Amino acid sequence: MDLVKRLEEYRSEQQKLNWEGTFKEYFDMVLSNPTPAQLSHARIYEMIMAGGVGIVGDGDRRYKFFEHELFGLDKTLQQLVDYFHSAAKRLEVRKRILLLMGPVGGGKSTIVSLLKRGLEQHTGTDQGAAYAIKGCPMHEEPLHLIPDSLRAEIERNHGMYIEGDLCPACRLMLQEKYDGRAEDVVVERIGFSEKNRVGIGTFSPSDPKSQDITELTGSIDLSTIGEYGVESDPRAYRFDGELNIANRGLMEFIEMLKSDEKFLYGLLTLSQEQNIKTGRFSMIYADEVIVSHTNENEYLNFIANKRAEALQDRIILIKVPYNLRVSDEVKIYEKLIKQSALKNVHIAPHTLHIASTFAVLSRLEPSKKAGMSLMKKLKLYDGEDVEDFKLTDVKELQEEAQREGMEGISPRYVINRLSNALVRDNVSCINPIDALRALRDGLDQHTSINKEEKEKLLNLISEARKEYDEMAKGEVQKAFVYSFEESAKTLLNNYLDNVEAYCNRQKLRDPITEEELEPDEKLMRSIEEQIGVTENAKRAFREEILIRISSLARKGQAFEYTSHERLKEAIQKKLFTDLKDVVKITTSTKTPDAEQLKRINEVVDRLVAEQDYCPICANELLKYVGTLLNR
């Protein structure tokens, strides 16, 4: 990389954004393309949609604007986009404060941060270009220069909706600098920037005794008040409060409900009337999205406060619960680890999956459905097939547990504990057992966990370990199978031949003796029993397989052992069961002979080559499975 060249290119790109012209030129520009003059909610909605939309699951939308940073919050993000969509149409919801409520570490701050960073990038593109009156402290929309009496005519002739009024500083500047000639007022292109305090504001509450309301609404300019004499002169006032500089964009009100009431009263007028009361001036128009976030306890206390009813009525609440899908939880930790400087430590397969399993288990509520354990619920939520239940049960389970995801272990705790395990001295690889040990040891340091909750979490760690035990045995047994795919295909074909004969009440013909034989019930049951198919349910299961074969055939697709999730599991378990004794003897021998050592090395090589293990975690896996099989 040629740094000097790249810096020159960067400056050149920035220069392209430095457009200036008269208001007349700007007006002609928005006549042909009204996008630059859109209101704040519409700008954010367009920014999100510009990223693209994907369809997942049962027609659910996934917005690409969020997809690399937020995982498992599809419902929350859909509500968020629905809000901006309605607000972009200038419906009444735009005159509301958007409040994100959820547990710590659930993604509330990340959502707001993405919106802010997104605005900075979007206004730097041609599609998201924004313009303002040059010299305006509130980066005013230039169309405010058009008098109210002319706006109806402009909307009638050009279909251009104009909302808002000039701020006191621009009103004075129009008269004194431009002699009332609005068409000559200089307009410039602006790029939203939180650092430069353009279009993006952030307010964080602190000690109410020392914090001043002027942080929100601006303050008297002590250096000029003597010159101009009165506080109502715009030149004697700094319009630099967070609400002022966030005009045209977004204002983040961190932990709004922890603020003193005097800070909240100003939001009442701003949210409903889109006006800020500043000093000795009349109401000042402001067009901005107000977003805040809080936790559940603070919100419940706020709702219980009858004095806050007016503000409560001006809030749109969006819940941001913890993610409840293991596959999405894994993506969270993968993202956080990739952002670190960690380079030389290998993470064994299933490590993040098992850590995620524990985290998600802690967030789930027990179901009243008979036979529905937390682990089964977890798998259903993650799109897996579960015995006796279907994916259609998910909606009913979600409706049964309205607060699900509002409590439990946060991603921050998990990544903190994983980080602790990853940076220990002389560690070159961590595996699922290392992760579970780190999660368990960290419970003593968790400040908000009582004895009863700790016991519950220890039980969940035990559940996650049982899940890993099965995964570990499966990994090793599969690695021991020579030509696994071929063995599985052979077993599948034998099973399907017998199932077809059984369901059609036919006999099979021996390929060698040509003798007619009854379907091999023993073979079929030895496979079906691996996944708990009962004697009474065997016919229904077999007929279901034939229906699946017929359905795929109509689409021109072949049926393979992976085409039916439960049959795939049954085939694998049958093969593994037949091989169990070989695995047990080989992995548990303390002093293996040459043949056993050769087989162990072959298994390690296969795990390294095919399953992303390193030699260290592959050997650890074999030792661990050896102890499991000898219990």
Image (cartoon, rainbow, N blue to C red):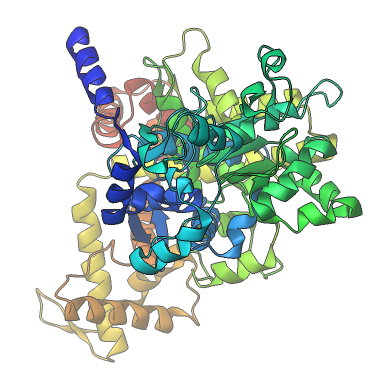
**Residue 405 shows in the view:** no
Of the pair 343 and 560, the residue shown nearer to us: 343
Of the pair 595 and 605, the residue shown nearer to us: 605
Q: Is residue 402 left or right of residue 178?
A: right
Does residue 1 lie above or below 84 as drawn? Answer: above
Toward the bottom, the furthest residue is 505
Instruction: Report x, y in % for residue 531.
Output: 46, 64
Q: Is residue 203 left or right of residue 489?
A: right
Toward the right, the furthest residue is 306
Identify the residue at horizontal 49%, vertical 56% (top origin): 81
Instruction: Report x, y in % for residue 206.
Output: 77, 25
Instruction: Report x, y in % for residue 416.
Output: 59, 24
Of the pair 213 and 10, the residue shown nearer to us: 213
Total labels drawn: 0
Does residue 576 lie above or below 561 as drawn? Answer: above
Q: Is residue 344 left or right of residue 378?
A: left
Q: Which quadrant would the N terminus be assigned to in this image? A: top left
**Residue 505 shows in the view:** yes
Toward the front, the furthest residue is 179
Q: Which quadrant would the C terminus be assigned to in this image? A: top right
Identify the residue at horizontal 60%, vertical 41% (top origin): 108
Instruction: Report x, y in % for residue 509.
Output: 15, 82
The image quarter in which residue 563 lies: bottom left
Of the pair 375 and 93, the residue shown nearer to us: 93
Identify the residue at horizontal 17%, vertical 70% (top origin): 558
